[in-house]
Image: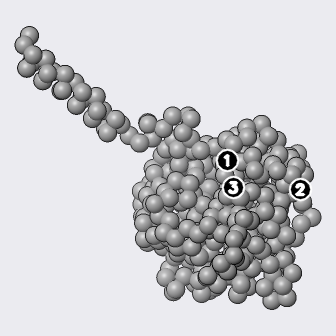
Amino acid sequence: MNHRFMRYALSTLISFMLSFPLVVHASETTSGQDKLKILIDTDPGVDDAFAIFWLMSLVKQGFAEIDSITTIGGNVIPQKTFLNASRILALGGFAHVEIARAARSDYKCLGGSSEDIFGDDGLGGVAMELPESSHNYDKARKADDLIVEKLNAAPGEITVVSIGPLTNLAAAEEKSPGILAKAKEVVIMGGAFRYRGNMTSHAEFNIHCDPNSAQTVFKSRNDTVILPLDASHKILVTEEQANSILETNPSSKIAQFIKKFNSFMVLSTLSSRDSHGIRGFLVHDASVLFYLFYPETLMNIRRAEVNVETKGQFSIGQTLIGERHFAKPEANSWVVLDVDEVNMSAILVEDLKTLVSLDGSKSGN
Ligand SMILES: [Ca+2]
């Protein structure tokens, strides 16, 4: 064997080895270590349901793991959000995931709940059509207990994603000061900075619901990530896109519910004049997952000292960024103020198509 042939054989072998990873599907490259372990704090809520469906897709593609779910009253009362979370998990085949009940079951949202937007059941009137709940509200652990135990057991490993009022996270922080700093990250959908509020002119729903808890959470660590209405009001799933998801697998129950949720929310969103007249549904809660899995879609991220107005006569629940040029050793957050909405919408729809294409459930409905 001459040297020229040996060099050729060696270079061919190296080229083959280098090219091999390029033909492996992305999900197959994700080791268990790379998966994000996620605790979701939620008040389902149709946009919560969309965020959870999307997360299910990311789990099934090998990118994430749902560690547990904590529920809080918000869009509807705590007993209903707990039940809704359980039914949504059952639909996606995640009934084994633990769900905690609200840390404060007597808590009431400051401005009342959102039946006018999401329907009496919080899920556009179709909650009872979802699979039966396999979790028991009365026997479930309280959210603050679960959060404290989980973060103490695995410091720095669990990403806490909040897509509801911040009551549970604040209750955990009050029970065990410093506990939220043990999360890998705390990522929150909430607030409105340069964009109008959706509860009042100045306040976003999740923060307005429980402004004191929001302030406690923002003060709990110095790197909270906030996806406010400034970002989320651009994330739209249109009627046409919901149809395309259903067409991907018409027999999938998940696809059928996505279509039902979308149909309900299109009308609700039009009536609240939030979608520029487009027949689409604003999926605010999904915004947190763009930060975690598709950060290239975030266009304007501000380091900021964020505070919540907890006493204002007209501005309670408003989120504020310190703007004057004085030193800010108390900067506590990263705030996303603008996004690439065209690609966000396309990404979300494609991942939902992946979920429904993997869904073996059948329904005659
Ligand atoms: Ca929510």
The amino acid type of the residue labelled 1 equals: Lys
* Kind of element beneath mark 1: loop
Which mark, by number, is residue 174?
A: 2
Which mark, by number, is residue 184?
A: 1
Label tally: 3
Which mark, by number, is residue 97?
A: none
Mark 1–mark 2 Cα distance, whole angstroms, equals: 19 Å
Q: Residue at x 64, y 61 (%)?
A: 225
Q: Is residue 307 above or below residue 170?
A: below
Q: Quadrant of residue 266?
A: bottom right
Q: Position of residue 110 (x, y in %)?
A: 85, 76
| Crowd around label 2: few <14 · some 14–19 · many ≥20 (10 Å) | some
- Going from N to C along the chain, the mark reached first, 3 or 2, is 2
What residue is pinned by disc 3?
186
- Disc 3, disc 2: CB below 8 Å? no
Check the picture and name the quadrant holding the N terminus. top left
Q: Residue at x 43, y 58 (%)?
A: 350
Q: Quadrant of residue 217?
A: bottom right
Question: Farthest residue in the right direction?
Answer: 106
The amino acid type of the residue labelled 3 equals: Val
**Near-viewer residue (261 or 183):** 183
Q: Residue at x 51, y 86 (%)?
A: 277
Mark 3–mark 1 Cα distance, whole angstroms, equals: 7 Å
Query: Would you say residue 115 is visible in this rendering?
Result: no
Task: Note whether ligand 1 is within 8 Å of mark 2.
Answer: no
